[in-house]
Each structure stands twice: as structure tokens, then as C-alpha cells.
Image: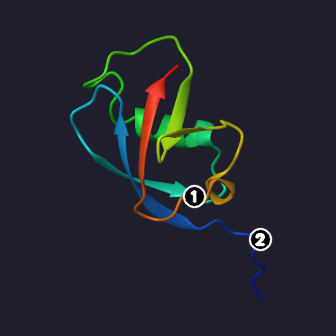
């Protein structure tokens, strides 16, 4: 008999790191915090097409900055929504 622990829902987001020219399709978990989401987006742009900075990153959805500690599920972001990540 298998036992399963609580699982997270994986879904894609359309994303852009501010200053990049590429639109990304990034899979995130609904339990990821915005800090983790920002890092997942950054790994596809920072150091490749966007200069690396020693600064925090934030996630914007519908023009609003989301708190770094809330999860995807808490944020109201839906699969295939557009987000932007930027240095602060």
C-alpha cells in the first residue's frame, strides 16, 4: 500500500524578467513562494540576457508587486497568467 503526502499542483506561467526580450513559460508549484517563483524565472534570464545584480527580486502580477512570502495559491495567480520579475 502506498501512502501519499500532500502534493502540490504544477502549472505553467508566462513570465518575463524585466530587461529581457524573451517571454518564458515557467512551471511553478502552487506551494512556491513568490521568492521561489522569482528565482525560477531568473534562472532562465539572469546571467544570460540580463545582467546579474546583488539585489532582491520581486514578482508583479496585474501590475501589482506581490509579497515575497505568499505562495502561488495565495496570490490568485492562475495557470498561464502573465507575471514579471524584476530587481528591487
* Distance of label 2 from label 1 (alpha carbons): 15 Å
- The colour style of the image is rainbow
Image side of residue 79 versus residue 49, left or right:
right
Mark sitting earlier along the chain (2/1): 2
Return the residue found at the far top: 54
Q: Residue at the location (46% across, 65% down)? A: 79
Return the residue found at the far front: 63
Q: Residue at the location (36% across, 25% down)? A: 46
Mark 2 vs mark 1, foreground winner is: 1
Badge 2 marks a residue whose secondary structure is loop
Please tell me whether residue 21 is drawn above or below residue 48 in the rendered image: below
Residue carrying label 1: 29
The picture places residue 39, in percent across and down from the top left corner, at: 51, 35
Image side of residue 1 versus residue 72, left or right:
right
Q: Residue at the location (51% across, 11% down)? A: 54
Residue carrying label 2: 5
Badge 1 marks a residue whose secondary structure is strand
Total number of numbered labels? 2
Could you classify mark 2 by the number of other residues whose Cα lies within 10 Å: few (under 14), some (14-19), or many (20 or more)?
Answer: few
The picture places residue 75, in percent across and down from the top left corner, at: 63, 53
The picture places residue 57, in percent across and down from the top left corner, at: 53, 26
Amino acid at each position: 500500500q502506498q501512502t501519499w503526502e500532500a502534493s502540490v499542483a504544477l502549472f505553467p506561467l508566462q513570465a518575463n524578467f524585466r530587461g529581457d526580450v524573451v517571454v518564458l513559460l515557467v512551471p511553478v508549484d502552487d506551494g512556491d513562494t513568490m521568492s521561489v517563483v522569482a528565482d525560477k524565472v531568473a534562472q532562465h534570464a539572469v546571467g544570460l540576457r540580463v545582467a546579474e545584480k546583488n539585489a532582491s527580486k520581486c514578482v508583479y502580477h496585474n501590475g501589482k508587486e506581490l509579497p515575497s512570502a505568499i505562495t502561488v495559491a495565495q496570490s490568485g495567480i492562475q495557470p498561464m497568467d502573465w507575471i514579471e520579475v524584476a530587481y528591487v
